[in-house]
Amino acid sequence: MPRIRVEVDGVPYEDDVEPRLLLVHYLRDRLGKVGTPVGCDTSNCGACTVLLDGLSAKSCSVLAVQADGHEVTTVEGLGTGARPHPMQRAFHEEHALQCGYCTPGMIMAAIDLLRENADPSDEEIRDGLEGNLCRCTGYQNIVRAVRGAAGEMRQGAPEREVSP
Amino acid sequence: MIPASFEYVRALSVEEAVTALSAAGEDAKVLAGGQSLMPLLRLRLAYPDPLVDVGRIEELREIRDTGDALVIGALATHHQVLRDPLVRAHAPLIAQATATVADPAVRHRGTFGGSLAHADPAGDLPAVAVALDAVFLLRSVRGEREIPAADFFVDWMTSALEPDELLTGIRVPKLGPGWGVHYEKFHRTAQAWAIVGVACAVRRERGAIEDARVALTNMGPTPVRAHAVERFIEGRSVSGDAFRAASEHAAEGTSPPADLHGSSEYRAHLARVLTARALTAAAAV
Amino acid sequence: MSEIAPEALAEKAAEDAPVSSPDPAREIGAPRRRSEDARLITGRTRWTDNLQPPGTLHVAFLRSPHAHARIVSVDVEQARARPGVVAVFSGADLAEEQGGLPCAWTVTEDMKTPLHPPMAVDEVRHVGEPVACVVARDRYAAVDALEEIDIDYEPLPAVVDMEQAVRDGTPLVHADLGTNESYRWVFENGDVDAALRDAPVVLERRYVQQRLIPTAMEPRAVLCEPDGEDFTLTSATQIPHILRLMLATVTQIPEHRIRVVAPDVGGGFGSKLQVYGEEVLCLLLARRLGRPVKWTESRSEGNQATHHGRDQIQRLTLAADRDGRIRGLKVDLLADMGAYLMLVTPGVPLLGAFMFNGIYKMDAYSFTCTGVFTTKTPTDAYRGAGRPEATFGIERLMDELAAELDLDPIEVRRRNWIRHEEFPYDTIAGLTYDSGNYEAATDRALALFEYDKLRAEQADRRERRDGVQLGIGVSTFTEMCGLAPSRVLGSLSYGAGGWEHASVRVLPSGKVEVVTGSSAHGQGHETAWAQIAADRLGVPFEDVKVLHGDTAVSPKGMDTYGSRSLAVGGIALYGACDKVVDKARKVAAHLLEAAEDDLEFDAGRFSVRGVREAGATLQEVALAAFAAHDLPDGVEPSLDSDATYDPDNFSFPHGTHLCAAEVDTETGMVKLRSYVAVDDVGSVVNPLIVEGQVHGGLAQGIAQALYEEAVYDAEGNLTTTTMADYLVPSAADLPEFVTDRTETPATSNPLGVKGVGEAGTIASTPAVVNAIVDALRHLGVDDVPMPCTPERVWRALREAFDENPEPSTGTAPGAGGGLGSAGGAQ
């Protein structure tokens, strides 16, 4: 079994893995990082989106061995309830989630989108999130949240607590 | 779903990769970005033996200028291709079509060479390669060979790659001044595959089309060059009527598939409508 | 269509049904950000698949590749020998103990209900039906071993087409039943035949509600942990309470030995309102093996094995006078049950029986529904359940009637709808609509939509024979929520009641625990219920914790579906809060040495009328009730209470939705240009949550109109097994919605609430299809079957053109590309 070294949310790991092990199962079943869920088997839904060396990737369509030597950031590595990432806070403020199952992937994809384009139009946000499906929100508040987070992140706003 | 077990070989150089492929049998599969392969593995529609991971061969990521052409390394990701100044300057049709491939996360990992080697006629890039008369650069322990795009796509998801061969790069002739390009993709949702796509490049001179290249996505088991359209339009003045008349020939010689998203008849109709639109957009240089 | 200026309309509408502006001092009505979010946005979730108790074994199911076949033999020996495999079972191995899955709704006395074993024993009747299972050390080993199971099938004929299925001589899905017809259910009021015979205008239409896959983002998952004779079953379910009772009934394990937990549940939309074979089997496997067992569905598995929705063929006949007044409506349905009757399968289309009349008055109505077996995945509730089908039928017909009479579609509705002064109104379908104001919602929607301006643009495009035509779709809908008055369910032979339960505990420290029988899976009950309790008890929002989704914590409940949570469960909570205040009043009166009647309760504090300073807070009362040192006679220690609410009537949200669609007449592509939804859901607890529910509902209704369809081939194979083929729209495929509300409180409950979970879905599908047809009607098109794919739109145009090559105005479809429309598909 190949041995891999991966840094996940700032913590280094070294593990022997079956070559066929999916990165998302490595995260969930081996590391206990269950914040990243699985929603499909064809890479359509995007629920499993993480950042791989800073770029969004669907962790159900990456083998753990492919992540060897790389850095993974999951939704668990972004912020905490008390000190959330601006994107997390924007999702809360704009009611951009209902059941929340797509939310980790949606947030990671949205962060990636702003890395590419710090001030996207609504249309650019919608196009940029085409790889992430949500069944609850109709996307409208997600678009609002990304727009809101973009404004805040451009101003480099300090992290604030989530209002109750 | 979960992939079946497979033997895994990590190749760190082209040499290692072709050696591994040479030692393997017919069932070997090359893993590049994995964005087409992983769903097949997970649905257990593919049982590779072994899986040769070439994803770490840095030299295959390069995009370089060779004078009258670009050579795009097979492992250049869609993300990389989209932003590459050489591609934008000399092969804008590739940049345009690549922007329509899948979604940003998939484009981060999916590779130019991988999409082409996958030889899915519903993929956007094969038709573009055919339209641009790209040349596929292959390596094996037996040596190197070059195959023109027109000969590379053999059948549905089947390319001219031998089991022991690796696609290392694609040479794309530069388009000079006067060329306009357009990729017209028609799909039901943003995520859906093209029902039909039209890759089009035309060169205008003194109000006439001097040169035209048109290739179709998903109009047969392989990408199809619409030669009849090209022949009709070349030498004619730029006009809506001329484009409409030319596009009437778009479905000639095609054998469009019928599936959930469109019948053969509808695809033939779409090919005509979309070809006219693609010509119109491309000609407005 | 109207000479009144939009502004004037908006003003008038606002006068008619103003939306109450929230009182800043009150929790009810405040746009609270959700307390659920903190864990969901940080990944600290409890999805069932996240749970992995020590020693957990993983289950994988082998499923039928045939639509219909006899199982000749099952050989599991090779699979058993695989490394890491603990056990392998066929259906026959578990036949003695697995029982049959329940159907809780025997809609007619002679309804045919086939046995539905959780794992097939002798015969499979749809692709995806479980036939064997592997229990292994991990999920990879379990799936690997499936490939080693050898099953010999003898194929039987597939029964795919409903209309074919009910013809004589068609192969039977269940040979022992002797028919593919499960039931025929009839409702009649007034003389429909006379109306159809006598009316000057009679329209006959056939509409098809395609089969849909609910597609909650979280695939199903089940974990069962044995503990001696007890079992804790954790499941991605909407119905922990119903599931517990049904598991006990099916397995004969005593009900009090089973605890069901619904942890974080990632959406349901009806698909998790079910008692699934995998749930029963995980319980049985945990009992057999004495270890925790877990099963997690893959998406491609779920598309075949999680119940589907809709799938009905409607034959509708509408009779009207020349002025557009409806005389009668005859509804004749074929409803596809799929291969088996699941929890409420047969009842779903019948919910439509009460809704086909919509918001309209008529003299006569008849409804007939025939439930049909086919060799397909069973159908059951999907967001709206019966009501979207009915709303689609009547709202499409209203547009057809308008076209037939050359009336504006709004005008023909106005002439028929129940006027706001006519409430309460007894409808032809036997319900009493308590409140509503269709005029107000419609006027508001017209103003927001800029209806007249769009009509002018439409006329211009027609005139110019533009390659992109514009259509306007109208849907003035109502629906029935708050399922349901138990006596009504009884009269419909449903197997249970429709009440809901809540309890409220004021803890010694003054903090409050609310326990609800509703089981949220994305709706935001933890926030909205806390708002209600905080409002009624006068305590801070932050001091309220809502507990739900665990039968050990919340022992009584009827769970969440049918837009019932607030309209039934919220009212139970309201009642429980009142009881707590009543009890607190007794204690406070005793503490303050005042008469109960002299106490005022405001903002969480009791005070003696006229003596503000003499008072006791609820927290002080709670502590006194806990200490119990000095309670009045007859008052039990501790400050808590509970209430069970059984509604007297349904509630009836309504609204007016307007959709503008651009149709590319060359390609058939439809693009939604704008969408206005004005909903009247009565009083509102949290406007943010209400708006979110409307958005999501719209997306699903639009998706039915344009994108989604579960497709079976002639052999009964599902061809849309993955998300690559079953097209769920992304953000890039949907427009920005304009939403607004009018507010006519429900009179049937003290909060005035109606329910909002399904409104958007119910209203939007006909609005979109009406818009498409409206764009093309002048070209001879009067219907496009759903989903309105580009090819179907193109075919409709072509057929119309073939029938009448020279329509009044308009372009010939399929005439090849034109410069004028080159931008149409951009």
Image (cartoon, coloured by chain):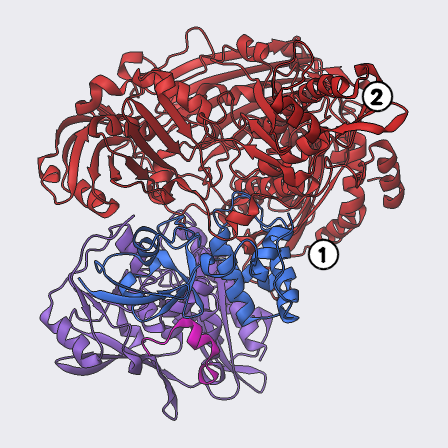
Task: Write down the region rendered in magenta.
Answer: B73-87
Q: Quadrant of the N terminus of chain C?
A: top right
Residue at the image point whose x is 12% and y is 34% from the top? C76
C315 within the magenta span: no
Separation of disc 2 and disc 1 at Cα?
Answer: 44 Å
Judge whether residue C321 can be spotted in this image. Answer: no
Same chain, labels 2 and 1: yes
**Colour seen for chain B:** purple
Q: Can you give x and y, in whole percent of width and height, for residue C825 in the image? A: 57, 60
Badge 1 density bin: few <14, some 14–19, many ≥20, Cα 10 Å: few
Magenta span dominant secondary structure: helix
At horizontal 68% and vertical 55% (from top left) the residue drawn is C465
Image disc number at residue C464: 1
Taking the view exactly as shown, the residue that stands out farthest to the front is C629
Q: At label 1, which amino acid type do we have? A: Arg
Rendered shade, chain A: blue
Colour seen for chain C: red
Asked whether, in this view, residue C730 is left or right of residue C452, the answer is: left
Marks counted in the figure total 2
Subunit of mark 1?
C
Q: Is residue B201 above or below residue C478?
A: below
Residue B84 colored in magenta in the image: yes
**Would you say the residues marked 2 and 1 are in contact, meaning their CB atoms lie under 8 Å apart?**
no
Residue type marked 2: Glu
Residue C421 is labelled as 2
Give x and y (percent) for residue C812.
60, 52
* In the rendered image, the vertical position of residue C457 relative to residue B26, given as above or below: above
